[in-house]
Image: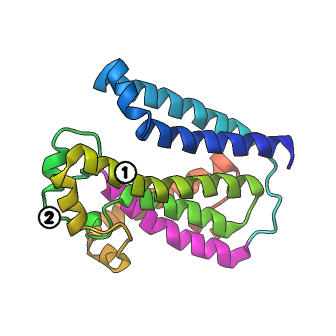
Amino acid sequence: MEPALLSLTAASIAFVGTHFALSHPLRAPLVGMVGEKGFPAIYSLVALATFIWMVLAFRAAPSPDLPGSGEFGWIAVSVITIPAIVLWLGSFKGNPAMPMPGAEKAAQAEPSGVFRVTRHPMMWSFALWAVSHLILFWSMRTLIVASAVLFLALVGAKMQDRKKQALMGEAWIGWESRTSYWPKWSALFGVGWGLWLIAIAVWLLFSWLHIPVADVPAGVWRWF
Protein backbone atom coordinates (compact mmCIF):
# COMPACT_ATOMS: atom_id res chain seq x y z
CA MET A 1 0.00 0.00 0.00
CA GLU A 2 1.36 3.40 -0.95
CA PRO A 3 2.24 5.98 1.74
CA ALA A 4 -0.81 8.21 1.12
CA LEU A 5 -3.20 5.30 1.65
CA LEU A 6 -1.27 4.15 4.73
CA SER A 7 -1.59 7.64 6.16
CA LEU A 8 -5.31 7.66 5.39
CA THR A 9 -5.76 4.27 7.03
CA ALA A 10 -3.91 5.46 10.14
CA ALA A 11 -5.97 8.66 10.24
CA SER A 12 -9.24 6.73 9.89
CA ILE A 13 -8.25 4.34 12.67
CA ALA A 14 -7.28 7.30 14.85
CA PHE A 15 -10.58 9.06 14.12
CA VAL A 16 -12.66 6.01 15.01
CA GLY A 17 -10.45 4.84 17.87
CA THR A 18 -10.37 8.19 19.67
CA HIS A 19 -14.16 8.49 19.35
CA PHE A 20 -14.57 5.14 21.07
CA ALA A 21 -11.86 5.77 23.66
CA LEU A 22 -13.13 9.22 24.65
CA SER A 23 -16.76 8.14 24.67
CA HIS A 24 -16.18 5.08 26.84
CA PRO A 25 -13.03 4.07 28.82
CA LEU A 26 -11.46 7.54 28.96
CA ARG A 27 -14.65 9.51 29.54
CA ALA A 28 -14.99 9.02 33.29
CA PRO A 29 -11.35 9.79 34.20
CA LEU A 30 -11.28 12.85 31.94
CA VAL A 31 -14.56 14.16 33.35
CA GLY A 32 -13.04 13.67 36.80
CA MET A 33 -10.05 15.80 35.76
CA VAL A 34 -11.67 18.60 33.75
CA GLY A 35 -15.35 18.34 34.69
CA GLU A 36 -18.48 17.82 32.61
CA LYS A 37 -18.08 21.23 30.94
CA GLY A 38 -14.42 20.76 30.08
CA PHE A 39 -14.76 17.27 28.62
CA PRO A 40 -16.66 18.30 25.44
CA ALA A 41 -13.83 20.71 24.59
CA ILE A 42 -11.24 17.93 24.76
CA TYR A 43 -13.50 15.57 22.81
CA SER A 44 -14.10 18.19 20.10
CA LEU A 45 -10.42 19.10 19.76
CA VAL A 46 -9.35 15.47 19.35
CA ALA A 47 -12.20 14.78 16.90
CA LEU A 48 -11.31 17.89 14.88
CA ALA A 49 -7.59 17.06 14.80
CA THR A 50 -8.13 13.47 13.63
CA PHE A 51 -10.77 14.59 11.13
CA ILE A 52 -8.41 17.19 9.61
CA TRP A 53 -5.70 14.53 9.38
CA MET A 54 -8.17 12.22 7.62
CA VAL A 55 -9.26 14.95 5.18
CA LEU A 56 -5.68 15.88 4.29
CA ALA A 57 -4.71 12.23 3.84
CA PHE A 58 -7.83 11.65 1.73
CA ARG A 59 -6.94 14.53 -0.57
CA ALA A 60 -3.39 13.24 -0.96
CA ALA A 61 -4.54 9.73 -1.94
CA PRO A 62 -5.23 8.82 -5.59
CA SER A 63 -8.75 8.86 -7.03
CA PRO A 64 -10.35 7.25 -8.92
CA ASP A 65 -8.26 4.05 -8.91
CA LEU A 66 -10.97 1.37 -8.92
CA PRO A 67 -13.30 0.34 -11.76
CA GLY A 68 -16.50 1.64 -10.11
CA SER A 69 -19.99 0.15 -10.22
CA GLY A 70 -21.22 2.13 -13.20
CA GLU A 71 -24.59 3.77 -13.72
CA PHE A 72 -26.42 1.13 -11.68
CA GLY A 73 -24.22 2.01 -8.71
CA TRP A 74 -24.94 5.72 -9.08
CA ILE A 75 -28.69 5.09 -9.26
CA ALA A 76 -28.58 2.90 -6.14
CA VAL A 77 -26.50 5.46 -4.28
CA SER A 78 -28.81 8.31 -5.27
CA VAL A 79 -31.79 6.39 -3.86
CA ILE A 80 -30.04 5.31 -0.64
CA THR A 81 -28.86 8.77 0.33
CA ILE A 82 -32.36 10.28 0.46
CA PRO A 83 -33.55 8.17 3.45
CA ALA A 84 -30.13 8.76 4.98
CA ILE A 85 -30.87 12.50 5.01
CA VAL A 86 -34.40 11.86 6.32
CA LEU A 87 -32.91 9.99 9.30
CA TRP A 88 -30.21 12.60 9.83
CA LEU A 89 -32.57 15.58 9.81
CA GLY A 90 -35.14 13.83 11.98
CA SER A 91 -32.54 12.87 14.58
CA PHE A 92 -32.14 16.47 15.78
CA LYS A 93 -35.62 16.68 17.30
CA GLY A 94 -36.42 14.90 20.58
CA ASN A 95 -33.34 12.69 20.53
CA PRO A 96 -32.54 11.37 24.05
CA ALA A 97 -29.09 10.29 22.85
CA MET A 98 -28.09 13.93 22.44
CA PRO A 99 -26.16 15.50 25.36
CA MET A 100 -28.86 18.07 26.09
CA PRO A 101 -31.10 19.17 28.96
CA GLY A 102 -34.27 17.09 29.05
CA ALA A 103 -32.68 14.00 27.48
CA GLU A 104 -34.05 11.73 30.22
CA LYS A 105 -37.56 13.14 29.73
CA ALA A 106 -37.25 12.57 25.97
CA ALA A 107 -36.32 8.94 26.66
CA GLN A 108 -39.57 8.50 28.59
CA ALA A 109 -41.75 9.72 25.71
CA GLU A 110 -43.39 7.53 23.09
CA PRO A 111 -41.21 7.20 19.98
CA SER A 112 -42.32 9.33 17.04
CA GLY A 113 -40.92 10.38 13.69
CA VAL A 114 -37.62 8.74 12.79
CA PHE A 115 -37.41 7.12 16.23
CA ARG A 116 -40.14 4.75 15.11
CA VAL A 117 -37.60 3.58 12.53
CA THR A 118 -34.63 3.22 14.89
CA ARG A 119 -33.44 4.74 18.15
CA HIS A 120 -30.15 5.59 16.40
CA PRO A 121 -31.31 7.56 13.34
CA MET A 122 -28.17 9.70 13.13
CA MET A 123 -25.87 6.67 13.33
CA TRP A 124 -27.86 4.85 10.65
CA SER A 125 -27.79 7.93 8.42
CA PHE A 126 -23.99 7.80 8.59
CA ALA A 127 -24.12 4.05 7.94
CA LEU A 128 -26.23 4.56 4.80
CA TRP A 129 -23.83 7.27 3.62
CA ALA A 130 -20.96 4.83 4.09
CA VAL A 131 -22.76 1.99 2.32
CA SER A 132 -23.55 4.27 -0.62
CA HIS A 133 -19.86 5.08 -1.05
CA LEU A 134 -18.86 1.42 -0.74
CA ILE A 135 -21.36 0.57 -3.50
CA LEU A 136 -19.71 3.09 -5.83
CA PHE A 137 -16.40 1.17 -5.65
CA TRP A 138 -14.82 4.40 -6.86
CA SER A 139 -11.42 4.45 -5.15
CA MET A 140 -9.39 2.86 -2.36
CA ARG A 141 -9.41 6.13 -0.42
CA THR A 142 -13.22 6.16 -0.49
CA LEU A 143 -13.41 2.51 0.62
CA ILE A 144 -11.11 3.21 3.58
CA VAL A 145 -13.06 6.23 4.84
CA ALA A 146 -16.48 4.67 4.18
CA SER A 147 -15.49 1.48 6.01
CA ALA A 148 -14.29 3.51 8.99
CA VAL A 149 -17.52 5.52 9.11
CA LEU A 150 -19.65 2.37 8.80
CA PHE A 151 -17.79 0.71 11.68
CA LEU A 152 -18.03 3.87 13.81
CA ALA A 153 -21.77 4.22 13.15
CA LEU A 154 -22.91 0.65 13.77
CA VAL A 155 -20.54 -0.35 16.56
CA GLY A 156 -20.77 3.13 18.06
CA ALA A 157 -24.57 2.84 18.24
CA LYS A 158 -24.29 -0.42 20.19
CA MET A 159 -21.72 1.07 22.54
CA GLN A 160 -23.89 4.16 22.97
CA ASP A 161 -26.68 1.93 24.27
CA ARG A 162 -24.38 0.58 26.98
CA LYS A 163 -23.18 4.06 27.93
CA LYS A 164 -26.69 5.49 28.09
CA GLN A 165 -27.85 2.57 30.22
CA ALA A 166 -25.14 3.47 32.74
CA LEU A 167 -25.85 7.21 32.60
CA MET A 168 -29.66 7.23 32.37
CA GLY A 169 -30.62 3.90 33.91
CA GLU A 170 -34.28 2.93 33.66
CA ALA A 171 -35.12 5.86 31.36
CA TRP A 172 -32.84 4.52 28.62
CA ILE A 173 -33.75 0.88 29.26
CA GLY A 174 -37.40 1.86 28.78
CA TRP A 175 -36.48 3.74 25.58
CA GLU A 176 -34.70 0.63 24.30
CA SER A 177 -37.82 -1.48 24.97
CA ARG A 178 -39.95 0.86 22.85
CA THR A 179 -37.47 1.33 20.00
CA SER A 180 -35.19 -0.77 17.81
CA TYR A 181 -31.48 -0.81 17.09
CA TRP A 182 -32.12 -2.31 13.65
CA PRO A 183 -34.15 0.02 11.41
CA LYS A 184 -37.76 -0.79 10.59
CA TRP A 185 -37.54 0.63 7.10
CA SER A 186 -41.28 0.57 6.43
CA ALA A 187 -41.72 3.10 9.26
CA LEU A 188 -39.83 5.66 7.17
CA PHE A 189 -43.03 6.37 5.25
CA GLY A 190 -44.72 7.43 8.48
CA VAL A 191 -42.27 10.17 9.47
CA GLY A 192 -44.25 12.85 7.65
CA TRP A 193 -44.13 14.21 4.12
CA GLY A 194 -42.86 17.54 5.39
CA LEU A 195 -39.63 15.91 6.54
CA TRP A 196 -39.34 14.02 3.26
CA LEU A 197 -39.72 17.21 1.23
CA ILE A 198 -37.08 19.01 3.31
CA ALA A 199 -34.79 15.98 3.00
CA ILE A 200 -35.15 15.94 -0.79
CA ALA A 201 -34.32 19.66 -0.93
CA VAL A 202 -31.24 19.09 1.25
CA TRP A 203 -30.30 16.06 -0.89
CA LEU A 204 -30.44 18.21 -4.02
CA LEU A 205 -28.23 20.82 -2.35
CA PHE A 206 -25.70 18.32 -0.97
CA SER A 207 -25.46 16.41 -4.24
CA TRP A 208 -24.92 19.70 -6.11
CA LEU A 209 -22.19 20.67 -3.62
CA HIS A 210 -20.53 17.36 -4.44
CA ILE A 211 -19.44 18.95 -7.73
CA PRO A 212 -17.34 21.86 -6.36
CA VAL A 213 -16.19 19.95 -3.27
CA ALA A 214 -15.30 16.56 -4.78
CA ASP A 215 -15.26 17.46 -8.49
CA VAL A 216 -17.69 14.60 -9.10
CA PRO A 217 -21.36 15.15 -10.09
CA ALA A 218 -23.73 13.16 -7.87
CA GLY A 219 -27.46 12.58 -7.58
CA VAL A 220 -29.65 14.03 -10.33
CA TRP A 221 -26.82 16.39 -11.30
CA ARG A 222 -24.99 13.37 -12.77
CA TRP A 223 -27.62 13.14 -15.50
CA PHE A 224 -28.80 16.77 -15.82
User: Can you say whether 23 is above or below 182 in the image?
Assistant: above
Quick one: quadrant of the C terminus? bottom right
Label 2 sits on residue? 110
Residue ID at (27%, 64%):
115
How busy is the neighbourhood of tag 1: few (under 14 within 10 Å), some, or many (20 plus)? some
Left or right for 218, reference 183: right
Eye-nearest disc, 2 or 1: 1
Relative to 210, 120 lies left or right: left
Percent across and percent down for residue 167 are 25, 43
- Is residue 105 magenta-colored? no
Quadrant location of residue 26? top left
Q: Residue at image x 33%, y 47%?
A: 163
Type of amino acid under label 1: Gln
How was the colour assigned to the protein in this rendering?
rainbow
Secondary element at tag 2: loop
Quick check: 79 above or below 94? below
Q: Which residues are magenta?
A: 69-92
Hey, what amino acid is under mark 2? Glu
Q: Which of 187 and 19 lies nearest the eye of the viewer? A: 19
Disc 1 designates what residue?
A: 160
| Horizontal side of residue 164 vs 67, given as left or right | left
Q: Position of residue 112 (x, y in %)?
A: 20, 65
